Each structure stands twice: as structure tokens, then as C-alpha cells.
Amino acid sequence: MGEYEKMIAGQWYDANFDAGIRERRARADELCWRLNQMAPRDPARDELLRELFPQLGESVELLSPLYVDYGERVRIGDGCFINHGAYLMDGGGITIGSHVFIGPNLGAYTAVHPLVAKERNQGLERALPIVIGDNVWIGGDVTILPGVTIGAEAVIGAGSVVTKDVPAGVVAAGNPCRVLRPITEADRIGLL
């Protein structure tokens, strides 16, 4: 089993010194650089986004700058909005459901490194998936850590550090992020 296959399987793998892994990241880095240099209305931008994200839904808006490790390990559903400054460290895979709103400066990190320095210095890493359900709203400057699932229709407050799963239909915030309350009928603004 190669290092990339180990990464996909959630096993410890050589993230720093394997030529195949490094080449995949270099390709994504180049695509991100090109994307971040483009004018927002450049018609070639959509084509480049689809090259970077083969699993990109319809009617998705991604604002630059945007950074990924691979791109091919990200799935973005229909009708999503991702604001400026997102970094999707997608070795473990990142799934973003449909109609997700993401504020500026999201950090979604799937990588875990060994705690023992000698092992860490060998370039070892393990990548755990992040899953964001449909209709989630994530405020600005949120950090999502490896292995986290955020349930459908949850709201994550600005500045939160999400260290564990968040259930569906709640407001959660803080460092570490914790559930504050459920979203209820009382939260309707009455315009629909």
C-alpha cells in the first residue's frame, strides 16, 4: 500500500518525504496560486475551480484567497458559499453538504501528527475526515479539528474551535466549541 492509499485509509503515512504525496500537494498549490491571482469575474475561474475540486456542486461561490492541500479530497455540495481565506487541509477528506454558509478565515484541519518528536520528525501524519452537514452556517474565524462532524442545520459561532462532533439543529460556540442551545421556532425572523 502506497503512502497516498494509507492516507485515504486513515492510517499513519509519510506526509513530508513521499514523492507522490508531495507532487499531489504541489499540483494543488499551483492551482490555488493561479485561482488566487484571477479576477473574481474571470470566466476561466469556474473551470479552474472544477479542476481543483472534481466533486464541486452547482451554484457554489468560493472567494479568494483559498487554499487546499489536495482539492481532490474535498466534496462541496450545491449552493454553498465559502468566504475569503479558507484553508481546507483535506488529506482525510472534507465533505461540505449543500447550502452551507462559511464565514471568512475557516481553518478545516484533517491532519494529526505524532506527539513523540522522533516520530513526528519522520514526517508521519494521520488524516481524519471532517464532515459538515447540509444547511450549516459557520461564522468567521472558525477552526475545525480532525475527525469532526457538524450536523445538518447547526450554527457555529464566530471564533469557535470545534474539537468534537456537533449535533444537528443547534447553536454551538466557544473554545472549545460547545452546544449552547437548540434552534427553535422562536428563532424565525418571520419573513417567509
Image (cartoon, rainbow, N blue to C red):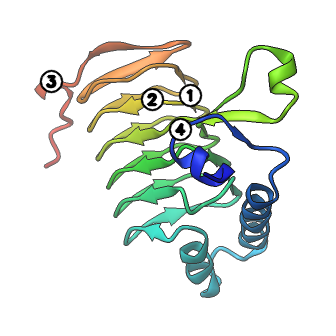
Q: Residues within 10 Å of mark 1 (few under 14, many from 20)?
A: many
For label 3, the residue is 186
Which of marks 4 and 1 precedes in the sequence? 4
Three-letter amino acid code at the position of disc 2: Val
For label 2, the residue is 148
Spatial distance from mark 4 to mark 2, Cα to Cα? 14 Å
Name above or below for residue 125 compared with residue 99. Answer: above
Q: Position of residue 67 (x, y in %)?
A: 69, 54
Q: Nearer the viewer, mark 4 or mark 3?
A: 4
**Foreground pick, 107 / 174:** 107
Please give the label number shown on residue 145: 1
Q: What's the residue at 45%, 68% (across, down)?
A: 56
Which of marks 3 and 2 precedes in the sequence? 2
Q: Nearer the viewer, mark 1 or mark 3?
A: 1
Q: Residues within 10 Å of mark 4 (few under 14, many from 20)?
A: some
Spatial distance from mark 1 to mark 4, Cα to Cα? 15 Å
Three-letter amino acid code at the position of disc 3: Ala
The answer to the question of whether label 2 and label 1 lie on touching residues, with beta carbons closer than 8 A, is yes
The answer to the question of whether label 4 and label 2 lie on touching residues, with beta carbons closer than 8 A, is no
Q: Residues within 10 Å of mark 2 (few under 14, many from 20)?
A: many
Q: Position of residue 28 (x, y in %)?
A: 71, 64
User: Image check: 155 left or right of 173?
Assistant: left
Three-letter amino acid code at the position of disc 4: Gly
